Amino acid sequence: MDDQTLRNMELEMRRGVLTLSVLSQLKTPRYGYSLLQRLADQGMDIDQNTLYPLLRRLEKQGLLDSDWSVEGNRPRRYYVLNDQGREALQTMTEVWRDTTAVMQRLLDSSDFGEDVDQ
Amino acid sequence: MKVHWIERYIQAVGEHLPAKERQDIEEELRSLLLDTLEDRTGSSGPYDDETVLAVLQEFGPPRETANRYAARPRYVIGPALYESYLHITGMLIILALIGQAVAFVIQIARGDLQAMAAVSASIGRAVSTVVAIVGWTTIIFGAIQYFSKPEEQPGEDSESWDPRELPDLRGEERISRTESFFGIAISVVALLGANFLAFRLGIYGDAAPDPSLAFVNSDAVSRLLPWWNLIWAAGLIHEAALLIKGRWNRAHRWQAIAIDVASMALLIVLFRSELIISEQFLALGGPEQAESLARAGRIVPAALRGVFLGAMAFTLWDLIENIRALAARRL
């Protein structure tokens, strides 16, 4: 398997958790760049060209509210979870925990362990 | 001269965005770019060209950035074709309506048709023509959109893209093609109506080629007609020039202001609608006339005043908008 295929698989896996990552950090209002940095600080690097369209999509889906606010002399758009978003976050968090528990069991299973050991 | 790379980039991204979302996404993109620059340099600007260009290079080709923002990657008619679609549809509608208007005027002039019957038939024909044109152009453009493959322009792939090749910033405001076509259509109707139809409006006797009782005062209308023609022709040329240019500039704004002022002056004269209505028709309002005729004699001048008042309000609004745009250097 070449590096490109591996990279694509990694990207695909990360893409699946982006929405939950973003929702988890928007219980308080944040503008895009501060969210980008907060995610990066915690090890979740997202390309800026990916994050902003994602925020817009989540807003269109009715999970986020946004509002322009002027700081200094520059307007910034703040995003925050609304009621529907909080509900979605709670549900997705439960799904995530169930999934990671299942994955943990799968990865810890003897077959995989034997393959790795070899 | 300072090169506004960020604005150039935003302008280039905006070219690929749907009109409805363009302004919102452009503002958000500007905010993101400035936040990124502030973070990189630790200052709120100004930023040197090298830093700005490096950030733009990271953001990638404008078309790619726009595609990420676009709510739906597939359209019936996408942004690349949409302006042409509006352009061609509008042009076809105008040409078809002009053809029908000319045919209508000729038929009326030859006395082939009864005025009221001809008007209702013409309205029906015009509506079905517009619907047919919109339908066919939509189908054709939809088919072009469906079968065409997105073409990558030179230098637009991520590796070879260079922000230094971004097109110059146009210090002009985009025009609304729909408004321009509407303006052209109104100008054509106003010119044709005043020159060919106004003198033929009236009450007709049996099979008479000319009205036995004309609505308009021929002398007064003939005196005002050159001014009317001058203003509407100037408006028509102005709209056509805007459409070709695609953007406002200061000269266009000044032209629009001059046309608005001249229109306002003429509308104030026309507001005294008694000037342009024939004396015989005005006399219909007298008590000695039959009730229906007397009512027509009262209603028509009042309705005309209402039309001119509405036109004055619209012209004043347009004038204020043009002055505000000029003052704000929004061009």
Image (cartoon, grey):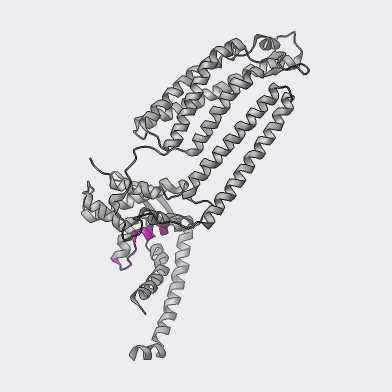
The answer to whether residue B27 is visible is no
Q: Residue B17: percent from the left, percent from the top?
A: 43, 50
Residue at the spot 60% in from the left edge and 12% down from the top edge:
B274
Q: Specify the segment rendered in magenta.
A: A41-54
Q: Residue B261: percent from the left, percent from the top?
A: 44, 21
| Label tally | 0
**Side of B199 where A26 appears, left or right:** left
In the image, residue B70 above or below residue B280: below
- Foreground: B284 or A101? B284
Residue at the spot 37% in from the left edge and 29% down from the top edge:
B251
**Quadrant the N terminus of chain B occupies:** top left
**Quadrant the C terminus of chain B occupies:** top left
Q: Residue B200: percent from the left, percent from the top?
A: 66, 18
Residue A50 is covered by the magenta coloring: yes
The answer to whether residue B244 is visible is yes
Residue B253 is covered by the magenta coloring: no
Q: Quadrant of residue B322?
A: top left
Q: Quadrant of residue B36?
A: bottom left
**Side of B90 where B70 appears, left or right:** left
Q: Residue B42: percent from the left, percent from the top?
A: 21, 53
Residue at the spot 33% in from the left edge and 75% down from the top edge:
A3
- Foreground: B286 or B322? B322
In the image, residue B51 above or below residue B175: below
In the image, residue B106 above or below residue B277: below
Quick one: which residue is furthest to the right in this view?
B206
In the image, residue A73 above or below residue B300: below
Residue at the spot 50% in from the left edge and 35% down from the top edge:
B179
